[in-house]
Amino acid sequence: MKLYYSPLACSLADHIALREAGFAFDLERVDLKTHRTESGRDFHEVSAKGYVPVLVLDEGEVLTENVAVLDWIAATVPALSVAGPLGRTRVLEALTYITTEIHRAFKPMWHGGSAEEKGRAAAAVSALMAPLGSSLQGDYLFGDGPSVADFYLFVMLLWAERFGIETPAPLRALRDRMRERPAVRAAMVYEGLLTGTP
């Protein structure tokens, strides 16, 4: 299994999830400006979409899109999902909200928006985080242990921190808890976001 990633991109959520799941996997960095992998391959040969994450399964199947990759991980390792008849649906609900609302709202921050556009984006991100901050069911979104949705939310919280965007106190506490998890630290060290040994 191989994950194609770019440091601090949304693929960090998948990287963390794979480590938390205990999978054996390889990693290959992608330069999203040149669309070249660290081995020199044209990334469009891996995925015509040209962006991360891309997870190539051992059987050769290629998965793209954060929600799909994270859902596959949670379906394979149920401890990273939520139990009960609506458990998977609730995780997908959170993942979809994060990707279609919060992630998308960051676009001006990453892609050269004007100061005015960035200001509107920051306000939007802050407002979009609020419902999640008020609905935590314990230390994480769905209780005392993290789901794949928490890993994606964590990346969004790192982005908010990077751009100085205000987030609810319960989510800042979640972010800080996540940083202490061994799999999270290992993924961040590997991607050059923290110093140390993965």
Image (tube, rainbow, N blue to C red):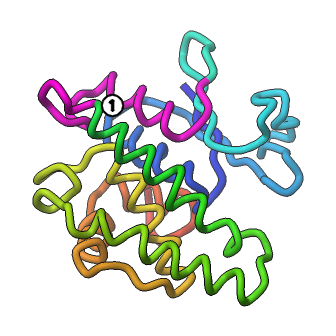
Query: Which corner quadrant holds the C terminus?
Result: bottom left
List x then y, in percent, for residue 177. Answer: 24, 68
The answer to which of 60 and 113 lies nearer the viewer is: 113
For residue 76, side relative to residue 26 (left or right): left
Q: Which residue is drawn at 59% across and 65% down?
A: 105
Q: Mark 1 points at which residue?
A: 74
List x then y, in percent, for residue 196. Answer: 44, 68
Residue 44 to residue 93: above or below: above
The answer to which of 59 and 87 lies nearer the viewer is: 87
Residue 63 to residue 112: above or below: above
Residue 55 to residue 57: above or below: below
Tell me the element at label 1: helix
Q: How many labels does the image show?
A: 1
Q: Residues within 10 Å of mark 1 (few under 14, many from 20)?
A: many
For residue 153, side relative to residue 34 (left or right): left
- Main secondary structure found in the magenta portion: helix
Query: Which corner quadrant holds the N terminus?
Result: top right
For residue 34, side relative to residue 80 (left or right): right
Q: Does the magenta stretch include residue 113?
A: no
Residue type, numbered disc 1: Ala
Q: Which residues are drawn in magenta?
A: 63-88
For residue 16, side relative to residue 45 (left or right): left
